[in-house]
Structures are given as structure tokens and as C-alpha cells.
Image (cartoon, helix red, strand yellow):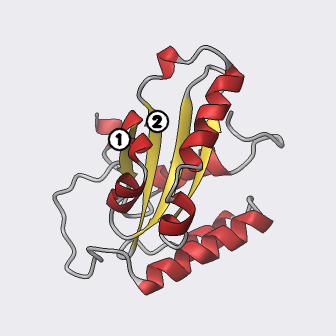
């Protein structure tokens, strides 16, 4: 557990300046992340310059039933179905973006970047999220948090993790 102490929020520290719901500034940050990473997925400096732990949050996601996946194609389709659930595009457009990988081991992992402190709005708009475990990274951008984010969203040798 100690190795995760800098990676996962303890939930003990509270900052009165931290947003308790999505904000307009958070929506602008989410839009900027989307625009930037659609064009250039390797510029982590730009990513961290946009990140504000007081109004945005980063969450890891893993599929709870990975051992029931039987083929890579079906697992990929399951991820596509998750991301195309009704309400996702309209309700979540300015409140999150995600990078989700289907691994050759048939596991599913991802990172979600939220406008606000938590993924509650996502859970409300997409009941399929109940099949996944979400864990907050940070909220501070420590070296461990940066490494975890980079591992998912930056290609290594031209390949994404998965």
C-alpha cells in the first residue's frame, strides 16, 4: 500500500478552494485537453500546464470482470459500447474525456479526466460504468501521478500501452 501513497488520494486532506461540482473553468480545461491530445498525444508539458487539481480530477479505470472476456474483438467492442452509451456525448461533452485501452490480456484500463472532483456525473449518465473500478490519481501532480498518466497516454516505441 505504501507505494501507492503518492498516487491515490487519501481523502483526508480537504482544500476549501477545491470545486465540489463541475465548473465553467473546468469545462475549458477539458476542452483544451481534448483539442491538444487530438492533435499531439506526446506533449505532456502542455497537459500538466492545463491541469488544475482544485477544479479538475484524474481517475484510473479498470474493468472488474476482465477474467470473463473471451476474445480481443469482443473486449474492444465492449469498450466501444461503454463509450457510446446514450447520454455520454451530450451529457458528458464538456465534463470529461478518456483514454481507454483494451490490452492483449483482455484487460481494460483507462484514464478519465474530469471537470470537477469526481466521476459522479459519469456514473449517472452511464450505468455501464458500474462494471469498472475508478480510483482517483492525485489530486496533486506528483512524480508518481505523472508517471501513471504518461504510461497510459503517451506511446512507447510508437505503441500505446495495449
- Residue sitting at the far bottom: 24
- Say which label, 2 or 1, has the lower sequence index: 1
The front one of 44 and 114 is 114
161 left or right of 149? right
Residue 22 rendering spot, x and y as whole percentages: 37, 75
Residue 72 rendering spot, x and y as whole percentages: 69, 22
89 left or right of 63? right
Q: At 59% from the left edge and 33% from the top edge, which residue is drawn?
A: 78
Instruction: Using the image, determine if residue 66 lies above or below residue 126.
Output: above
Q: Quadrant of the N terminus?
A: top left
Residue 115 rendering spot, x and y as whole percentages: 43, 71
Instruction: Using the image, determine if residue 132 lies above or below residue 38.
Output: above
Element class at badge 2: strand
Element class at badge 1: helix
Q: At 49% from the left edge and 59% from the top edge, which residue is drawn?
A: 87
- Residue sitting at the far front: 86
The front one of 154 and 35 is 35
Residue on which the image places disc 1: 4
Label 1 CA crowd tier, 10 Å (few <14, some 14–19, many 20+): few
Residue on which the image places disc 2: 62
Residue 129 lies in what quarter of the image?
Answer: top left
Q: At 79% from the left edge and 39% from the top edge, which residue is drawn?
A: 159
Residue 14 lies in what quarter of the image?
Answer: bottom left
Q: Is residue 147 visible?
A: no
6 left or right of 74? left
Q: Quadrant of the C terminus?
A: top right
The front one of 94 and 143 is 94
Q: At 41% from the left edge and 57% from the top edge, which residue is drawn?
A: 125
Label 2 CA crowd tier, 10 Å (few <14, some 14–19, many 20+): some
Label drawn at residue 76: none
Residue 104 rendering spot, x and y as whole percentages: 68, 23
Amino acid at each position: 500500500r505504501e507505494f501507492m501513497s503518492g498516487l491515490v488520494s487519501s481523502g483526508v486532506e480537504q482544500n476549501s478552494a477545491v470545486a465540489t461540482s463541475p465548473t465553467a473553468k473546468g469545462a475549458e480545461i477539458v476542452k483544451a485537453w481534448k483539442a491538444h491530445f487530438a492533435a499531439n498525444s506526446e506533449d505532456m508539458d502542455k497537459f500538466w500546464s492545463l491541469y488544475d487539481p482544485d477544479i479538475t480530477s484524474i481517475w484510473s479505470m479498470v474493468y472488474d470482470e476482465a477474467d470473463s472476456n473471451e476474445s480481443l474483438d469482443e473486449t474492444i467492442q465492449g469498450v466501444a459500447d461503454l463509450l457510446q452509451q446514450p447520454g455520454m456525448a451530450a451529457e458528458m461533452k464538456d465534463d470529461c474525456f478518456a483514454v481507454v485501452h483494451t490490452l492483449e490480456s483482455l484487460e481494460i484500463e483507462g484514464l478519465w479526466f474530469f471537470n470537477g472532483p469526481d466521476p459522479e456525473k459519469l456514473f449517472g449518465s452511464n450505468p455501464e460504468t458500474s462494471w469498472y473500478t475508478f480510483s482517483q490519481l492525485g489530486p496533486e501532480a506528483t512524480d508518481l501521478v505523472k508517471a501513471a498518466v504518461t504510461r497510459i497516454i503517451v506511446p512507447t516505441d510508437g505503441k500505446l500501452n495495449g
